[in-house]
Image (cartoon, rainbow, N blue to C red):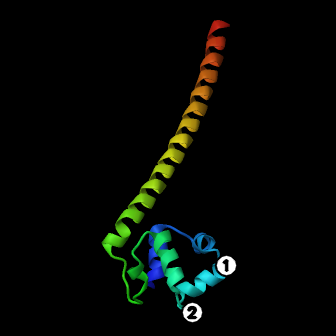
Amino acid sequence: MNSIKQIRVLKGYSQAEVADQLNITQASYARIEQGQTKLSVERIVQLSKIFDVSQSYFLNEDTVASAKDLEGGITNEYIKKLIQINQDLRNQIELQTNDRIEYLEKQNATLLNVLASK
């Protein structure tokens, strides 16, 4: 995996998201990742800001993301995703719990009516 794709995937972006931020098409961005389009200085500056890594990261074809380059962004993105997943699960459990309580209250009322009528 080349360095641009590696950092994009690790930071949790899709090609379309990065292309939008660069104001280019996804196909144009894909050519950058595939090495078919060379990076201009302007693109390097833009990508370093998008991915929150040093500009030197993009200057070497054999770059492997360093822990320093990836630490903040991955951690923050990962934490954001975990928080969202946690909130979604909490909401789902709350809805299921409320539905279950409502069902049990109806069953209890029915049982009380049956007992009262005897």
Earlier sequence position, callout 1 versus callout 2: 1
Picture coordinates of residue 89 (x, y %)?
51, 46
Q: Residue at x 45, y 75 (%)?
A: 7
Q: Which is more toward the observer, 115 or 8?
A: 8
Please identify the residue farthest to the left as the structure is shown: 67
Residue 20 locus on image (x, y percent): 63, 71
Q: Residue at x 64, y 74 (%)?
A: 23
Amino acid on which disc 1 is placed = Thr
- Residue ID at (49%, 74%): 8
Q: Which mark is residue 36?
A: 2
* Residue 16 or residue 44, whichever sits in front: 44
Q: Is residue 118 visible?
A: no
Q: Is residue 32 above or below residue 73?
A: below
Mark 1 lies on a secondary structure that is loop
Numbered mark located on residue 25 in the image:
1
Helix, strand or loop for disc 2: loop
Q: How busy is the neighbourhood of tag 2: few (under 14 within 10 Å), some, or many (20 plus)?
A: few
